[in-house]
Structure formats: C-alpha cells, structure tokens
Image (cartoon, coloured by chain):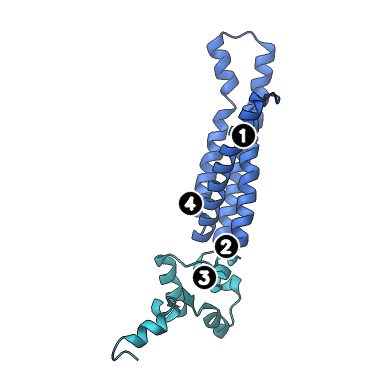
Chain colours: A blue, B cyan
Amino acid sequence: MSTTMNKAGRDYVVQFGGAMAAYVVVLIASIVVMQHTQLAPPIRALVAVSPAVPTVFALLAFLRFLTRMDELQRRIHLEALGFAFGATAILTFAYGFLENAGLPRLSYIWILPAMVVLWGVGAAVASWRYR
Amino acid sequence: MKNRLRVLRAERDWSQGELAEQLGVSRQTVNALETGKYDPSLPLAFKIASVFGQRIEDIFQPDGHELAASEVPGRE
C-alpha cells in the first residue's frame, strides 16, 4: 500500500467511524426520547428518523473514499457493488415470494447487512481475479 | 496488452511497493499491471512512462504488435 492509499484509508476510518459513533449516540437518544415522552405525531416521526442524519455523513465519507482509491481498486469496488446490488435484488424478491408461501415476514432492516456482506464477497472475488 | 514493467522495475531494483509509492497506487495495482490483468488508464500510463523515463509505446505493446509492425513496409 502506498502512502496515498494509507492516508485515504485512515481518513475514511476516522470519518466513517465518527459518523457511526454519532449514529449510535443519536439512536440511543432517539429511543430514550420515544420511550419516555408523549410527543405529537409529526415530532415523534422526526425523532424516530433522526438517527438517519449521521448516516448521511457516513455516506459522504464512503463516497470520498471511493474517489480517492486508485483506478484498479475503484474498478474492483464497482464490480463488487454491482454484484451486491443485483444479488440483493434477487434475494429480496425471492424472499418476498417465499413470504407469499408462508415464511415469516422479515424486516427491511436486514437488506443493508445483506448488501454489505454481498459487497464484501464481490470485492474478494474481484480482487482475486486481478491478482 | 503486453508490457515490460517487471523487467524495468527489476533493472532499477525496486520492489512492487516502491514502484506503487512513486505512482501513487496500491501494490496490488502494480502487480495487476505487471501480470497484464489490468491495463492502466492513459494518465497512469503517462505517469509510469515518466517514472521510467521512457515513452508509453516503449513500455506497453498491444497484443500482436510484432506482427503489425512487420507488416508495415520500412518499419523495422
């Protein structure tokens, strides 16, 4: 790894980690407020959605990291993300059909972990192909 | 595309990591370039040429280049 990449990697860890730490704090605060107060519905919705705000900063950190990668790494992640996008689409549709057949309903919250795992698998396969 | 990166690097006694450092890319990328698994963008190819002090066409040749050159009259 060259110094440039290390710097980009370090910045990413700091920025993404900071955004995730802020997410945890806002999430806990949001849950506490929701449980202990009786808010008007629109305010309640704002409090409930507030943990999504710090995740915007996580997205910005990720996009910055993507643009600072070298060209081969960017290609590897394009292939990996493309695979994760398509495979998640197939998985969620397939499970939707299975729900029609009586399997338990799963929360949307599982879609993100599925995307992340498939992205990791895709990145490992793409990296191996350019080895 | 074929290239002479591994030879040029060996002549200068650089590791893949050292070349990567000079090019501002990862060591993995230098390896993929040397094995011909990845063809560089034009800006990266110019950077490689400048690091080795040669022209791009002296480092990279398209597949079947020798055949094409021998077919052109007066070009030996």
Q: Residue furthest left?
A: B73
State which mark lies toward you, 2 or 4: 4
Instruction: Say which residue label 1 marks.
Output: A94
Q: Earlier in the sequence, mark 2 or mark 4?
A: 2
Q: Position of residue A44 (x, y in %)?
A: 58, 14
Provide the chain ID for the residue under circle 3: B
* Residue matched to label 2: A3
Q: Nearer the viewer, residue A9 or B39?
A: B39
Q: Are marks 4 and 3 on the same chain?
A: no
Q: Give the number of the mark in front: 1 or 4.
A: 1
Q: Chain of mark 1?
A: A
**SS class, disc 4:** helix
Which residue lies at the image location 60% right of the left edge and 46% below the top edge?
A: A119
Q: Which mark is residue B22?
A: 3
The residue singled out by tag 4 in the image is: A67
What distance separates the C-alpha of mark 1 from that of mark 3? 48 Å
